[in-house]
Amino acid sequence: MGKFLFEQNRNMHLKINNLKSMASTADMKLRPLNFFLGDNGSGKSILADYLNLMKRNASSAEWRNRHFPLVDQFKEHQDWRNWVGKGDTSKEITLVKNDSFLGRRVIVKVKYKQSSMANNRVDASIKGAQVSSLIIQQGQIPLLVWGADERRVYTKNLANYLYKAIKNHGMPSEEEWCEELFPSTIAKELRLDDIANFIDEGPEYYEEETSMDHLFYLDLGHLFFRKRLSIANSPKFHGVQLLMERVLGQFKNGMIDWMTETPVLRGERKLVLDEFDADRKIYTAAYFFELELENRVIQIESGQYWGKEVFLVQESKFSPLQFCGLGQQKICSWIQEWTSVLKQLDREMQSEFFETNRMVIIQHPEINLSIESQRKLMDMIVHDILQYPYLHVVIETHSPFLVDYVSSLIAKGTLSGKHVAKFQFSQNRKGETSVQSIPQDKYIQGCHGNAQFSEENANQQYKRIIVKREEHWN
């Protein structure tokens, strides 16, 4: 594997407040590769659970149309009170992430609160939630605040933000503008001086008063906003105002995509070698895990075609994957899920203007895998992180071996320590979760890190853990 290099520092800043057991704000500066560490029940899976909840609501027409719908598709015997810290529904859940336009960052916030308007077919007493506000700001400077109490675009602040971003980056060409943001007539005319003139002469803010003309469909306090935001009310500054609308829309869509499209992988899907990506899966299995896979046609005794099934080839013998060892099946499940993520990333067109980081959450990849297989799985993940600079991988794990192995990659220069982060989740006696960033030389549960990672050291440590467990239960 080659050096871990980025042209830019593409870290993802994420904050979560008042979610389940998180009494205080969890403030995480995510890197391309992240470990969530901690005991069972410490809160490592809160983020993954919440994103799965958002995805369960993603089937509604509102999500497809880039709107914010009610959240009411809970698991049985759950409602919104299960998701609010200490069950106090008077408090809002707040999610904060960063995006950027031409390398200049903004903070995007979404706040949820309990809604009495949510309907549940099973139990009418179950309460859902709704977006209470969407806020976009640069540092502490507001660019947009859209909620029940305030619906305002701070146009001069936003124009200043756009002016600095374009000035530092350079004015995009007419062709670049047209490809993502503008019709050709506006792109051809827009100049940096137009934005400067707007800063001097334009209105300080645009405020929605009629509650009818609005880019964001937020179901807030029985107020329904269904039309697009239009702040382009002056022909003189039409191009500048249209740019404002498009940029705000991109930031909103980036937050929605993150909430509804973040994959949570568990290594549970059956491996399928279909005609579209079979080659990639077969190559991945051979290159990283030294496994030979083949898709064979199955026929019943009459000779009639039955279907295809994946076989594992070992010493010239063909074994149906479903009858192979549990570890081999698990490896194939990870291959299936990981290559599906990469296939989706390949389909996505990365914006030339907007930085929207993608996240993948991997839950407990060590289950049913030997130490050697854990290393190979980590090699696969690291290899592909190198190829996708916008990708952020979060690994929830109890395995000290994965953390140690990544430390060995850092020591060899394959990875930069600046692009790996570890977060320790813990709970106090009140059941409140806190999250702490761990320095690179610290390890979980007293596990001593060893930059010179070796199979022998890992196996010896694993045996010590087994002995301690046996002594505990005896």
Image (cartoon, helix red, strand yellow):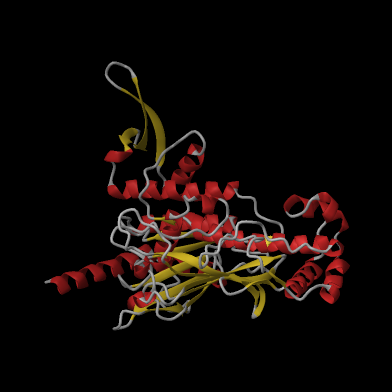
Front residue (pair 207, 69)? 207
Kindly identify the residue that appears in the image at 81 percent across and 60 percent down: 239
User: x, y percentage for residue 214?
Assistant: 65, 61
Q: Where's the C terminus, which quadrant?
A: bottom left
Q: Quadrant of residue 57?
A: bottom left
Q: Is residue 73 positioned above or below 166 on the image?
A: above
- Furthest residue toward top: 302
Which of 459 and 141 lies nearest the eye of the viewer? Answer: 141
Residue 6 in the image: state x and y as whole percent: 64, 64
> Residue visible at 53% across and 46% down?
343
Determine whether, in the image, residue 318 is placed left or right of residue 193: left
The reply to whether residue 447 is in sight is no
Q: Nearer the viewer, residue 44 or 260?
A: 260
Residue 142 is drawn in which quadrant? bottom right
Up/down of 426 relative to 341, above or below: below
> Can residue 236 be seen here?
yes
